[in-house]
Image (cartoon, grey):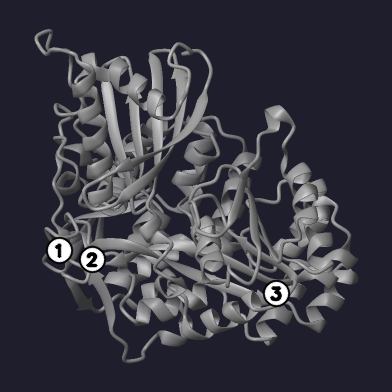
Amino acid sequence: MNESEILRALSEKEHLRLEQLQVVASEKAKTGTPFGYLLIRFGLLPAERWFNFVLRELKIPSIDLSQMEISREVLNSLPEFTCKRYQVLPIHRGGGKLVCAMVDPSDESVIRELEKITGLKIETRVARESDVRQAIDRYFTQAGIEVISPTRADGSGKFLQPTAVREVTESSAVGVVEEMVAQAVELKATDIHLEIEEEGLRLRYRINGMLYEFPPPPLELYSAIVSHIKVLCNLDIAEKRVPQDGYFRMKLPSRDVDLRVSVYPTIFGEMVALRVLDKANILSGLEQLGFLPETLHRWRMLLDEPYGMLLVTGPTGSGKTTTLYSSLNELDNVRRKIMTVEDPVEYHLRNVDQTQIAPKTGLTFAVALRSILRQDPNVVMVGEIRDLETASIAFRAAQTGQLVLSTLHTNTAPGAVIRLIDMGVEPYLIASSLIGVLNQRLIRKICPACRETYSPPDEEVRELSPDLVGKERSFFRGKGCHQCKGTGFSTRTAIHELMVVNEEIRRLCIHGATTPQIRDAARRSGMRTLREDGVEKVLAGVTTIGELLYATRKEEAER
């Protein structure tokens, strides 16, 4: 069937209106996303009905991905970003052909693109949308999870049920908590999630930004574990109906670790989330945070300014707090008085006066900031600018002699100016006080023990940077080994976008310029975008092409 025949069949057999199909066709023309996948995403056709339509009308054979094991050699036939973009997975290679499981195996433009990338004849099989999504997640997003996590793939190791013979004691609960924290530190996990569900307990660690499942403690110990954690945080052990937040420090053989705790009630009981605050991560210096030399020099010059506003931006979990703490740690805290207002205080810094806000008692960011300015500080760190009142006080402080550092949720550095104006901050305040904006993301680093060179397809290189196509460059990836638990990645590093505010940008702020206009001015003054910063790290063998494309896809789409 050609495209017009497929549209006619969808209209007649599935009763889709012409205007609905035109909307989908328009989106496909803009994004290149397969037509059938868009039908599912738009909610016009349930995934199962599309699958049956392809089988019945297009006579394309199906494949059950849940019953297959695909070799890494075959998976490497297509770049990760191509598989995610077109919802396709290579399943067999041989005889000059590549067999691919696809959500929409009827899209000729996608098939031609795949043949161009691989240089092979593409043979298609239809697969359920949920199967393709789960397979991509299994083979790419969470590759190596079976090695990292001791739970078995069939789920039989997922929950531990009560044994009815184990003695529940306070000391056993204490040992479990200590073991969980020690294991998290050993695995370099940032969070511990202990959850209770209908089937039993669930224990997960967030490692390099992704959650991995581990065998949970015995179910009969759960209440004692939660109570022990509450005692450590000075929380109310009798209160099980409302969320509670706390903090405690644990002494491990190697070092002390701070933990921020959130206890949250669910229909099956209380679940606990612990944020592992390892001070070793912030005391290693700004050099360890992934700054390119030129960007680091410009950021340090901004930190040396006597007054002004510095913002660190990015989504939740992008490392903003670590960058702020590392920056404060570099400042001369003997000759300069440094004060912070945070929610919550995540790390305790020497010679820095830190305050945690308490909205229930009336101590908000704005109230604390007003009082702090009467303490004669040189440097003030505000955990987050959340509202107009806090922003106005912070900017006036920056205008009257303090160096103020804070965070803001924006996708780009130039976008911070528009975000502040939208909040209601006067443009003249921004122009006179803002001296720099650092936007950042976290990306996974290639494991140094199993790093190897490879030749990516031109299409993958073109997506990274058209200027690199056809040039002799080395690209790297991780094969997976025992040191990285099979993932091919080790720790994480940051990519940065630093906008230093100059006279041109100040004039644009006052005259109500748009984000693209501010971005162009920042680029002229030397700002690298997140993608450009990341390209340098890809070429240096720090990270992979797929990891960078995934981390910066949203920002590039907005440009």
Q: Are marks 1 and 3 in contact (CB under 8 Å)?
A: no
Please name the amino acid that badge 2 sits on.
Ser
Q: Determine the secondary structure under disc 2.
A: loop
Which one is earlier in the sequence, the residue at label 1 or at label 3?
A: 1
Q: State yes or no: discs 1 and 2 in contact (Cβ < 8 Å).
A: yes
339 on left or right of 52: right
Query: Where is residue 300 shown, x and y percent of the image?
Result: 58, 79
Residue 547: % across, % down: 37, 64
Query: Do we see residue 155 in this rendering?
Result: yes
- Residue 18 x, y percent position in the rendering: 62, 40
Instruction: Check disc 1 and report its element: helix, strand or loop.
Output: helix
Q: Residue at x 58, y 72 (%)?
A: 332
* Residue 258 sits in quarter: top left
Question: What's the residue type where badge 1 is placed?
Answer: Glu
In this view, 530 is above or below 159: below
| Residue at numbered disc 1 | 73
| In the image, residue 84 above or below residue 174 | below
> Which residue was labeled with disc 3?
519
Contact (Cβ within 8 Å) of mark 3 with mark 2: no
Q: Quadrant of residue 179?
A: top left
Count residues near mark 3 (Cα–Cα under 10 Å), then give few for <14, some for 14-19, many for 20+.
many
Instruction: Give the residue at x 24% y 40%.
Output: 62
Identify which residue, 537 or 194, lies in the foreground. Answer: 194
Q: Residue at x 60, y 43 (%)?
A: 343
Question: What separation in Å lies between label 3 and label 2 (alpha carbons)?
Answer: 37 Å
In this picture, residue 348 sits left or right of residue 142: right
Q: Which of pointers 3 and 2 lies earlier in the amino acid sequence?
A: 2
Q: Quadrant of the C terminus?
A: bottom right
Does residue 60 appear in this view?
no
**Residue bearing mark 2:** 77
417 vs 55: above or below: below
Compared to residue 332, the image places residue 297 above or below, namely below
